[in-house]
Image (spheres, rainbow, N blue to C red):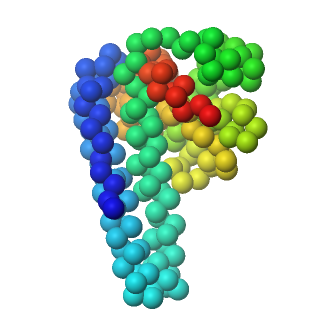
Amino acid sequence: MAYEAKDYSKILGMEGFSDTLLNNHFTLYKGYVTNTNKLLDTLAAMLKEGKTATPEYAELKRRFGWEFNGMRLHEFYFESLGGKAALNKDGKLGKLMADNFGGYDSWLQDFKGTATMRGIGWTILYQDVIGGRLFNQWVNEHDVGHPAGCNPLLILDVFEHAFMTDYGLKRADYIEAFLKNINWAVVEARVR
């Protein structure tokens, strides 16, 4: 069963994001879907042929995390966009932010601080599924730095491809545009 690229064209026309930027980003995402499927097919063939002890098999297994997470993180990112309503501070996520950060404003300060760190990667609001705690995490690469047992709630792509077309080096302006377009209902539905 192959993965299929999802259609995120509904967020075209969103304030703060040009259609050129979004369409380029969608193309990049589709590449992750294609490569995930190619890796799955190649790995299945190698398994069938008894080639699991080869260096090629090992490297493809390592590469799988990069392609799969690149696909899935982009899906979470795009699905989090297109909203207009503010976070319901009395809802489940708002209450968790109050418990874990002291309130939305403190969470936002920490999220922005994480997102504006030097480097490329992702800023992710996670929920520790076992402990319930929320925290913002910087992830350099798709496949490295994800805390075990944690559920990604809000994902911000801070690789240059996500903002350079529209914002150049003004990452902070891109982050503000992202924050204005969060679909909090989608994000809150991810809370466990």
Q: Position of residue 95 (x, y in %)?
A: 68, 17
Quadrant containing the N terminus in the rendered view: bottom left
Return the x and y of residue 9 as percentages of the image width and height. 25, 31
Location of residue 24 by image quarter: top left
At x 25%, y 35%, the residue is: 23
Q: Position of residue 99 (x, y in %)?
A: 75, 20
Q: How many marks?
A: 0
Q: Residue at x 73, y 42 (%)?
A: 130
Q: Nearer the viewer, residue 10 or 62?
A: 10
Say which quarter of the image contains residue 51. bottom left
Closest to the observer: 42 or 96? 96
With 38 as the anchor, is 85 left or right in this view? right
The spot of residue 81 in percent (x, y) is 40, 25
Q: Is residue 1 left or right of residue 125?
A: left
Query: In front here: 67 or 86?
Result: 86
Q: For the point 39% across and 75% down, which residue is it?
A: 44
Does residue 35 appear in this view? no
User: Can residue 52 be seen at all in this image of the molecule?
Assistant: yes
Query: In the current view of this chain or complex, which residue is farthest to the bottom?
Result: 50
Asked whether, in this view, residue 174 is left or right of residue 93, the answer is: left
Residue drawn 69% across the image and 14% down it: 103
Q: Quadrant of the C terminus?
A: top right
